Amino acid sequence: MIEKIRLDNILFLDIETVPLEENFNSLDDEMKHLWELKTQYQRKDDYTAEEFYDRAGIWAEFGKIICISVGYF
């Protein structure tokens, strides 16, 4: 386990993503179907595919990068 982390020579990288489209209904039929299949296990019966779409940014095929930040000490 790391006991102490020195704050010199550390590179910080942060990548912010969002869903590819603003909302689920903006997707074409094929992408809607693929989203339903891709998230079926995670959603279980608790959410519909549309309700779960706000999490689309974490999957590369359903998200896009909007910001990359880098910091260095």
Image (spheres, grey):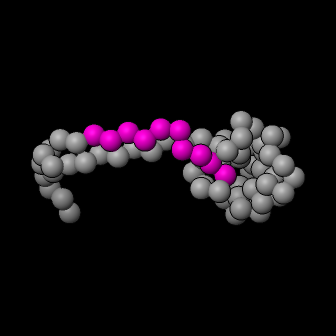
Q: Residue at x 59, y 46 (%)?
A: 64
- Residue 30 placement (x, y as % from top left): 84, 57
Task: Decide which of 8, 67 is in the foreground and name it.
Answer: 67
- Residue 22 placement (x, y as % from top left): 71, 36
In the image, farthest residue toward the right = 29
Q: Say left or right for 1 vs 61.
A: left
Q: Residue at x 39, y 44 (%)?
A: 14
- Residue 43 placement (x, y as % from top left): 71, 55
Task: Decide which of 43, 62 is in the foreground and name it.
Answer: 62
The kind of secondary structure the magenta stretch mainly shows is strand
Visible residue check, residue 55: no
Visible residue check, residue 72: yes
Q: Residue at x 20, y 63 (%)?
A: 1
- Residue 69 placement (x, y as % from top left): 38, 39
The C terminus lies in which quarter of the figure? Answer: top left
Q: Say left or right for 58 vs 8.
A: right
Q: Which residues are magenta?
A: 62-71
Q: Say left or right for 30 vs 56.
A: right
